[in-house]
Amino acid sequence: MSLPLQVIELVKNYKNVEAVKNVSFQIQPGEIFGLLGPNGAGKTSIISCAVTLEQPTSGNIKIFGHDVQKEPKLAKYKMGIVPQELIHHGFFNTREILEIHSGYYGLINNRKRIDYLLQKLGLWEHREKKVRQLSGGMKRRLLVAKALVHQPKLLLLDEPTAGVDIELRESLWKFVRELQKEGVSVLLTTHYLEEAEELCDRVGILNSGKLIRVGETHQLIKELTHRRVSFNLRNSQLNLEHELCISIV
């Protein structure tokens, strides 16, 4: 069986900036793999190359064995993408957006799937609303629904909970876990340590375009969350200074 995602020696340059530096990793079937790193680490650049929005400088990416540069249509049919930025389609209602997006995949009669996603993602009551009438959280849910209309077996989530409230974040986490139980593999980019710990089976730590560590989430989180905190306590009467050091694991 082909792997859901293989990133092979990927390099992406923007003029004089090397955004992605020889990055390689792969996702196993049914796995939630997290790319954890700060803004500007190269996470979105990797996603952009995977969905062919950007051309790699070198290296390649395969989706279920299909090279995204050589077989883009086959690769795109196998995956769904939830971008970081909200995309507005103000003249259409929620259901129409999903019907139009279904058409991109040749799915003419996709009502059953659309109804399922509207209900599952809490959009049913908003199905006749114009997209411009939706809140930011509802628009985020709509992006997830769009990514799943064709029932892909690989879902790419680029900072899916950035800027959303806690309630929406937790509901999206729950939905992603349900997708995993259905056999969907997930690539999640995030700068939230809590999100990676909550969802991911394995994590790759990305910094300044370099993939510096890949491993089991619980082990990497344990290493990352070891901190040394120093407190300087001054007793004004005795004019004594004491240092208290606490290790937090």
Image (cartoon, rainbow, N blue to C red):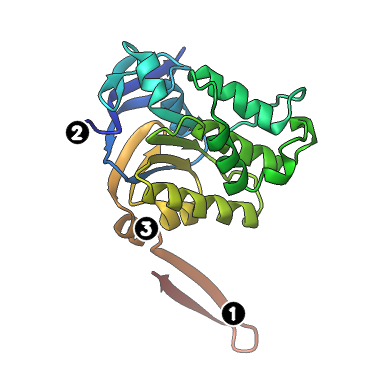
225 sits left or right of 175 in the view: left
- Residue 54 higher or lower than 125, as above or below: above
Q: Secondary structure at mark 2?
A: loop
Q: Secondary structure at mark 3?
A: helix
Query: Which residue is at a point 48% across and 57% down the rendered structure image?
Result: 194
Query: Which residue is at a point 48% across and 20% down the rendered structure image?
Result: 105
Q: Quadrant of residue 188?
A: top left
Residue 75 is at least partly visible in this image:
yes
Neighbours of disc 2 within 10 Å: few (<14), some (14-19), many (20+) = few
Between 163 and 211, the one lying in front of the other is 163
Tell me the CA gap for discs 3 and 2: 30 Å
Query: Which residue is at a point 74% across and 31% down the rendered structure image?
Result: 131
Q: Residue furthest bottom?
A: 237
Position in image of residue 4 (x %, y %): 30, 33
124 sits left or right of 193 in the view: right
Give the mark, 1 or 3, whose residue is nearer the N terminus.
3
Q: Nearer the viewer, mark 3 or mark 2?
A: 2
Q: Residue furthest right?
A: 133
Three-letter amino acid code at the position of disc 1? Arg
Neighbours of disc 3 within 10 Å: few (<14), some (14-19), many (20+) = some
Identify the disc placed on residue 181: none
Quadrant of the image containing the N terminus: top left
- Residue 71 higher or lower than 179, as above or below: above
Give the mark, 3 or 2, whose residue is nearer the N terminus.
2
Q: Which residue is mark 3?
A: 221
Q: Secondary structure at mark 1?
A: strand
Three-letter amino acid code at the position of disc 2? Met
